[in-house]
Image (spheres, rainbow, N blue to C red):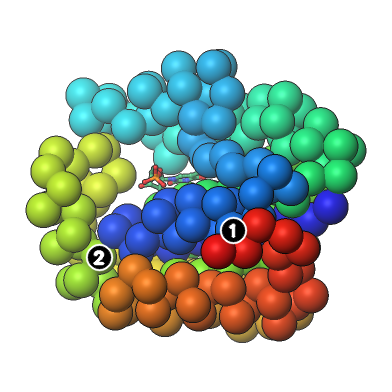
Amino acid sequence: MAFITFEGMEGCGKSTQAKLLARALGSDAVLTQEPGGTAIGRAIRQLLLDPANRAMSAEAEVLLFFADRAQHVAEVIRPALAAGKIVISTRYVDTSLAYQGYGRGLDLDRIRSVAVLATGGLRPDLTLFFDLPLEVGLARVVRRGGRDRLESEVREFHERVRNGYLELAAAEPDRWIRIDASGSEADVEARTRAAVEARGLAPSHGVR
Ligand code: TMP
């Protein structure tokens, strides 16, 4: 049983890498995501990402992300951990600290108090930060087409988010590993596998 989170900016490849790791872990793994890891969460996700919702306040935004997360923890993450699975989630509390805290300027300690309410204090065993120069990630997002409400934020916002991730990772080196997300999918997959193995969370079977 372990809880691993994948973090990073848009276009960093974390979702692809999460899928690859889950596949390598086979039936031991449960792959999930925020926002939108549950039916209720998918409805919340639509509200959050709809470009029409320009009027959303930063406080409403963070609480909606945590509403999604509270449901996700209760319905998916805790039951899977209780069943002995390795849960891999793309995004978790650290995304809110990076985006709503460092990005939007909300107070980090207040966000952490909401996190206690939403998650009951559940923390990841390992957090992988897929780091890529801003231009590369944003260019990938543009190629993918259609920017959602957060992807449309100005460059300075994304810079603050990236710096936030770096500070969060530096503050808790036992939990975080920064992964260079540049290069081919296979290169990044090898780095991801090495990081997971270095923390003793190696796939017990099903390795390709
Ligand atoms: P995704 O691109 O990983 O699907 O995430 C959707 C967007 O939501 C992405 O721009 C990051 C943002 N987000 C936050 O701002 N705060 C959060 O707590 C979460 C989970 C996502």
Residue at 73 percent of width and 37 percent of height: 77
Element type at mark 1: helix
Residue nearest the observer in this picture, 172 or 186: 186
Q: Quadrant of the C terminus?
A: bottom right
Image disc number at residue 24: 1
Query: Image height check: is 87 above or below 131?
Result: above
Identify the image quadrant of residue 168. Answer: bottom right
x and y percent of residue 22 in the render? 58, 52
Spot occupied by residue 25 in the image (x, y as percentages of width and height): 65, 55
Q: From the Cβ of disc 2, is ligand 1 less than 8 Å away? A: no
Residue in the picture at 11% in, 53% down: 143
Is residue 145 toward the left or the right of residue 30 in the image? left
Q: Which mark is residue 137?
A: 2
Q: Indicate yes or no: mark 1 CB to ligand 1 under 8 Å.
A: no
Depth check, front residue: 122 or 97: 122
Residue depth check, mark 2 versus mark 1: number of the one nearer the observer = 1
Q: Secondary structure at mark 2?
A: helix
Question: Residue 171, percent across and down?
Answer: 67, 79
Dot 2, how many residues are within 10 Å of its Cα: few (below 14), some (14-19), or many (20+)? some
Q: CA distance from mark 2 to mark 1?
A: 25 Å
Left or right of 57, for residue 207: right
Residue 20 or 6: which is nearer the viewer? 20
Report the label total: 2
Mark 2 residue type? Gly
